[in-house]
Image (cartoon, rainbow, N blue to C red):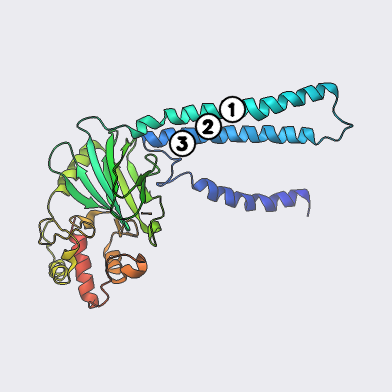
Amino acid sequence: MTKRTYANTLAPLLAVPWAVFLAGCTGRQSALAPAGEGAEKIATLFWGMTIGAFAIWLAVLAVAAWATRAHDGPSRSEEKLTKYLVIGGGAVFPTVVLTGLLIYGLSIMPPLLARAPEGSLRIAVTGEQWWWRIQYQPAEGAPFTTANEIRLPVGEPVEFTLESADVIHSFWIPALGGKMDMIPGRQNHLLLTPTRTGTFRGVCAEYCGASHALMAFEVVVMEKADFDRWLESERGEARPPSSPEALRGLELFTASGCAACHTVRGTAADGAVGPDLTHVGSRLSVGAGTLPTDLDALHRWLAQTDTLKPEVQMPHYRMLPEEEQRAIAAYLLSLQ
Ligand code: CUA
């Protein structure tokens, strides 16, 4: 093979891993495609450190190449240079660079840990195995509970209060800011200010059991007017179903014991063990980021919770006839 054909063969092979690697830098779950003030600072720090590390790596390679040159022992001037290199490159340079990075790193932390100004939106999030209990505490009006999806107004600081009901979880919306642990018996605070609208993905960033990787949530950043409309609708009670199938689903939902664990505001269902389902049909995902919300997915979820989310507390409902499972799914989808 000639040099040219080698290059032609190797180029696509090398391009694939790079494309895969760089694809990780975009998208709705990337800290390097920032959509929040905190994430912007973290991305700047990351790129500064990456470029700096690359420059230092090149310098070390150059010095290593110089040191391996074959010759008959160092000259007097080279001996002097070597001494400066060891003291300068080995002690002074790392001390100055690492101190500078530490000061810069610490300087961007306080805004991330600050408390939101008076009158800001506050959201309490509790990590549970393996879903998110979310309580909106708006400046005006009564607080209300929802689950597994967070909507935020663009350009406004929002203060999160983070807790855990069982083991340690970690709340992380990479596109908006840094992560914060959720520790049983303790309240942590995190301030996030989204800078652009869009749909992002939040995850649990601390191993918390069998379905840790299936504990995600959607984050929708909206214009303020859209957000206010959504908040009013989300705060309201569930509308009674209109189709006969969904009405049958509501009966089965009550008869099958679902109401013992789930709340649907406006109905008799007031269980607090599992996620609030008042507006579950309007959420983007089912099972905390596991499936997209549609009739088939809700049906699958009811029939296969044990395989879709290993060790989940919710039992499967395979014992119900298929059409009854379908009716409950239709009822859940009607909860807009
Ligand atoms: Cu919760 Cu990992």
Secondary structure under badge 2?
Answer: helix
Residue at image mark 2:
48
Distance from the alpha carbon under mark 2 to that under mark 3:
9 Å
Identify the image quadrant of the N terminus: bottom right
- Give the residue type that dot 3 points to: Ala
Residues under numbered marks 2 and 3 in contact, where contact means CB atoms less than 8 Å apart: no
Choose the circle earlier in sequence order: 2 or 1: 2
Q: Earlier in the sequence, mark 3 or mark 1?
A: 3
Residue 282 pos. (x, y %) = 23, 54
Q: Residues within 10 Å of mark 2 (few under 14, many from 20)?
A: few
Q: Which residue is mark 3?
A: 43
Report which residue position mark 1 lands on: 95
The quadrant of the picture showing ligand 1 is bottom left
Q: From what the image shows, is residue 138 above or below residue 306?
A: above
- Taking depth in this image into account, of 249 and 12 the one nearest to the observer is 249
Percent coordinates x, y for residue 96 in the rendering: 58, 25
Q: Residues within 10 Å of mark 3 (few under 14, many from 20)?
A: some
Q: Earlier in the sequence, mark 2 or mark 3?
A: 3
Front residue (pair 188, 217): 188
Quadrant of res 179: top left
SS class, disc 1: helix
Kindly identify the amino acid type of the residue bearing the numbered disc 2: Gly
Dot 1: few (<14), some (14–19), or many (≥20) neighbours within 10 Å? few
Distance (Cα) linking label 3 and label 1: 23 Å
